[in-house]
Image: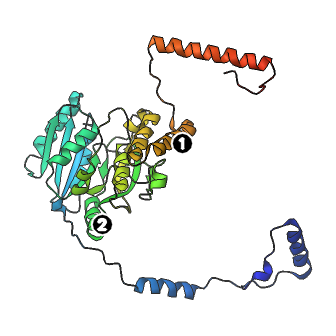
């Protein structure tokens, strides 16, 4: 290849010889292997190829229901609904379900908003007893009569073009579910400019990586109602977070198609008291292990659990549960006998490296 004379074998001797040659003879011209013309022609040829034959399933806003689970977020819910009012497309449905809020102000705000939007027949407000976010989202989805569902958290905000882009993307994509990028912002008063803290850009479904890291996306996705119901919706476990990660993993594991809209379509409010930041990292990740375990043989489930155990400092320790007194006494007895046995072995010089503890 052109320019090969400037290369050398990566060894100290060859490097020294090359340096001496350069000192004595200098560096000759190095031809550039990159050709702007060739690159331009290559991209032109790619663009000229016919697009794959993707079945067109036009999705209009009237075929979309936005599902919102609300619990004690009365200070944020008005901002979310205002962002939905500002959408560049209208005609979509909205179902807001209050999950038995215990905060009096949040209950008051929820009922006030229900009264304010009572003239919009497509916007529905429902109250129920507390059952957790998974149950609440599933109820909203069950009340929807549209072909597509969009889930949003009550403390987030939609970009004005969110639903327009989602509808356009679902119309040209064969995917059953599309997640998107997002921008995280600090929890600030509504009258202040948003301070963007980070961008979250999921890469899309990769089952190998998705068991350890959420490469799928956030709960703020659009999904075909048929696919959502086929996997049973969100699980209703209440002592752990990552229900969105778990749902998207199960969706891929069951063979449904997913993709990512590479555009930030909503603003994620980062609060220190967020559910995913106040729950056990161990239980959160075990939720993902359980989702994968549904599709693995017993040895595969054991292997997956052992893999997690080997990196448990990353995911947190398992919450300690108080054991019955008889079991605690038995464990102390076993530890005491083990320690005595190891000390006896050591005293005879048979196993200097055996641990005592």
Place of residue 22 in the rendered image (x, y in percent of width and height, measured from the top left): 87, 77
Q: Is residue 90 visible?
A: no
Where residue 283 appears, x then y in whole percent?
43, 35
Q: In whole angstroms, how far apart are the C-alphas of marks 2 and 1? A: 37 Å
Of helix, strand and loop, which one carries label 1?
Answer: helix
- The residue depicted at 13 percent of the width and 41 percent of the height is 114
Q: Residues within 10 Å of mark 1 (few under 14, many from 20)?
A: few
Q: How is the image coloured?
A: rainbow
Q: Which residue is mark 1?
A: 307
Quarter of the C terminus within the rendering: top right
**Rendered residue at 19%/36% (across/down):** 109
Q: Which callout, 2 or 1, points at the residue further toward the start of the chain?
A: 2
Q: Quadrant of the N terminus?
A: bottom right
6 up-or-down from 138: above or below: below
Checking the image for residue 169, the label placed there is 2
SS assignment at label 2: helix
Q: Is residue 353 left or right of residue 67?
A: right
Q: Is residue 113 above or below residue 61?
A: above
> Where does the image place residue 166, in percent across and percent down from the top left?
28, 62
Q: Residue at x 11, y 52 (%)?
A: 122
**Are the residues flagged by discs 2 and 1 in contact, CB closer than 8 Å?**
no
Q: Which percent across, then down, holds residue 279?
A: 41, 33
**Of 346 and 180, which appears nearest the observer?**
346
Few, some or many C-alpha atoms within 10 Å of disc 2 (few <14, some 14-19, many ≥20)?
Answer: some
Q: Quadrant of residue 188?
A: top left
């Amino acid at each position: 290849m052109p320019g090969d004379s400037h290369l050398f074998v990566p060894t100290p001797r060859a490097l020294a010889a090359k340096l001496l040659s350069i000192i004595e003879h200098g560096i000759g011209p190095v031809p550039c292997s990159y050709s702007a013309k060739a690159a331009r022609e290559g991209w032109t040829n790619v663009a000229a190829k016919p697009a794959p034959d993707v079945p067109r399933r036009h999705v209009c806003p009237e075929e979309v229901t936005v599902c919102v689970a609300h619990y004690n977020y009365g200070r944020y819910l008005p901002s979310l609904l205002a962002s939905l009012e500002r959408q560049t497309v209208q005609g979509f449905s909205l179902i807001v379900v209050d999950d038995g809020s215990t905060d009096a102000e949040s209950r008051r705000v929820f009922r006030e908003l229900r009264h304010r939007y009572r003239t919009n027949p497509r916007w529905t407000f429902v109250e129920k007893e507390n059952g957790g976010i998974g149950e609440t989202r599933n109820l909203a989805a069950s009340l929807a009569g549209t072909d597509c569902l969009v889930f949003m958290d009550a403390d987030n905000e939609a970009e004005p073009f969110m639903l327009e882009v989602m509808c356009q993307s679902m119309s040209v994509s064969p995917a059953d579910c599309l997640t998107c990028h997002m921008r995280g912002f600090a929890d600030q008063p509504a009258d202040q400019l948003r301070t963007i803290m980070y961008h979250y850009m999921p890469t899309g479904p990769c089952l190998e990586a998705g068991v350890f890291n959420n490469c799928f996306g956030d709960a703020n996705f659009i999904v075909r109602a048929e696919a959502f119901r086929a996997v049973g919706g969100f699980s209703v476990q209440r002592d752990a977070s990552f229900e969105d990660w778990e749902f998207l993993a199960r969706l891929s594991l069951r063979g449904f198609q997913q993709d990512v809209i590479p555009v930030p379509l909503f603003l994620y409010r980062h609060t220190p008291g967020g559910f995913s930041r106040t729950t056990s990292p161990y239980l959160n990740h075990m939720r993902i292990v359980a989702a994968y375990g549904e599709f693995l043989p017993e040895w595969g489930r054991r292997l997956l659990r052992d893999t997690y155990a080997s990196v448990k400092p990353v995911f947190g320790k398992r919450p300690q549960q108080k054991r019955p007194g008889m079991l605690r006494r038995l464990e102390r007895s076993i530890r005491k006998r083990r320690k005595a046995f190891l000390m006896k072995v050591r005293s005879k010089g048979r196993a200097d490296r055996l641990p005592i503890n």
